[in-house]
Image (cartoon, rainbow, N blue to C red):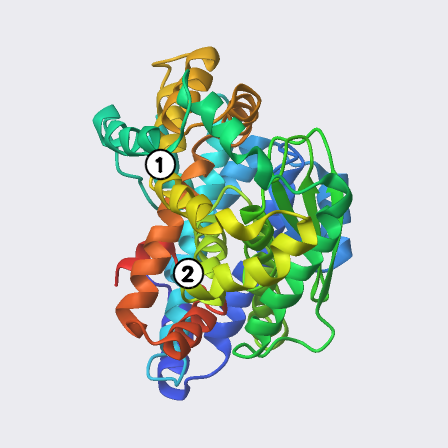
Amino acid sequence: MRTLLSLVLYALVSASGSVWAADGMDAIAERYVRLVLALGQHDPDYVDAFYGPAEWKTQAEEQKKSLDAIDVEAAKLSVTLIETPIAPGTADSGLRQLRREYLHKQLSAVAARVRMLRGEKLKFDDESRVLYDAVAPTLPDSHFDQIISQLDAKIPGEGPLSERYEKWRKPFVIPKEKLDAVFQAAIKECRSRTLAHVALPPNESFTVEYVTNKPWGGYNWYKGNFHSVIQVNTDLPIYIDRAVDLAAHEGYPGHHVYNSLLEKNLVRDRDWNEFSVYALFSPQSLIAEGTANFGREVVFPTKTERMKFEKEVLFPAAGIDSTRTDEYYAVQDLLKQLDYAANEAARRLINGEIGESAAAQWLQKYAVMDPARAQQRVKFIKRYRSYVINYNLGEDMVRRYIEKRSGTDPDKRWSEFGKLLSSPRLPSGLTD
């Protein structure tokens, strides 16, 4: 039951469309950011980016709130969020409603992560539902067997397919001494294509670093003020198709553009400070990874365009013979259909159905990974668990959402893509 004061305040908001509701949401947003920073003291992977007031981070480090205290505060904040009204009939009331829904789901994910850190064991699908607002389909081995049989016919030689495939694609490795030149060329092209359709802050930028001993292939560390540091892991051979993939996914129009547009349009223009922090294990990650993966198709709307650029620019820069480009990408198209294999390995490993060794063997067979790459993926799964769905399921959900609104028109696709990058839409909202 509302108190007399809350009824009076609600009446004022309804009558005037005043800023009270916005102020109430802004206070909730600040408390949410502080909660995420507090939880980051217990989980070093949790806060992926933060560029809000430095004193908030300092206070979180000094206070070191317990997991119990964070859990209680998250529950209280969720109730406060529900009770805070939104002024109806305003020009941006729809966007403000998305903001409320976003904060609600993000807070639910905070509470779920707290439970996990306190030792609660969740099944793969239950975990992805509470953390990422989505559940990936379960696919039987027979689904992958059909694709593997097609690949098997395309890769010559004898022995396990993963070994034959590694030998077959060895000529497409980018030499380490040419990595930076190839990546810079891919970044330049992706940036040019993105800027033709998306208005970015004039001082946006990022730097590239080459690192080792990581469980991932590439990572974008967003630093705020429209700047990112992109790290590329060189532990394993990097193949020519990864140049555009990484440039688009980590940079343009992927993570770097996504974070820059959120900072410009929501944090700076609207003072929605909840977007100054990025909680990695949250619904935001499905949007971030899904748009980054689909961004590869947005920046190169046709396969012909991408292959022409790679043949004329990237293959020569890497010193790779381009005469087998068509053959190479025909195989890559088939491998793309195996994307969900990583989900199945992760689901079975996390649910306790198989161990690490069996998971690596499964990835070798159904994701066509060599032993080293399979081991690296198992390390990723152990550390990030159901996060793997954000790449493949996220890409598919974003693709369906965008294409439902744009069809095959490249300009409309860019327009809808830009809107999604600048909004607080949730994974469950992609089905609207």
Expressed as whole percent of the image width and height from the top left, the position of residue 96 reads 42, 72
Residue ID at (39%, 19%):
362
Residue 404 sits in which quadrant? bottom left
Distance from label 2 to label 1 (Cα)?
19 Å
Q: Is residue 192 left or right of residue 19?
A: right
How packed mark 2 is, by other alpha carbons closer than 10 Å (few <14, some 14-19, many 20 or more), is few
Q: Is residue 426 left or right of residue 22?
A: left
Name the residue that disc number 2 marks.
Answer: 303
Single out the residue that lies furthest toward the front: 323
Give the answer, above or below, for where 60 lies relative to 293: above
In this view of the protein, can residue 108 be seen by the observer?
Answer: no
Q: Is residue 306 left or right of residue 219?
A: left
Q: Using the image as rendered, state which of residue 229 and residue 129 is in the foreground.
A: 229
Position of the C terminus, as image quadrant, is bottom left
Tag 2: residue type? Lys
Give the answer, above or below, for where 267 lies relative to 104: below
SS at circle 1: loop
Expressed as whole percent of the image width and height from the top left, the position of residue 102 reads 42, 58
Q: Using the image as rendered, state which of residue 337 and residue 257 is in the foreground.
A: 337
Residue ID at (59%, 51%):
246
Name the residue that disc number 1 marks.
Answer: 338
SS at circle 2: helix
Tag 1: residue type? Leu
Residue 27 sits in which quadrant? bottom right
Expressed as whole percent of the image width and height from the top left, the position of residue 73 reads 52, 44
Expressed as whole percent of the image width and height from the top left, the position of residue 219 reads 63, 45
Q: Kindly indicate whether the residue at mark 1 contacts the one at mark 2 (C-beta within 8 angstroms).
A: no
Q: Using the image as rendered, state which of residue 332 and residue 26 is in the foreground.
A: 332
Q: Using the image as rendered, state which of residue 268 and residue 416 is in the foreground.
A: 416
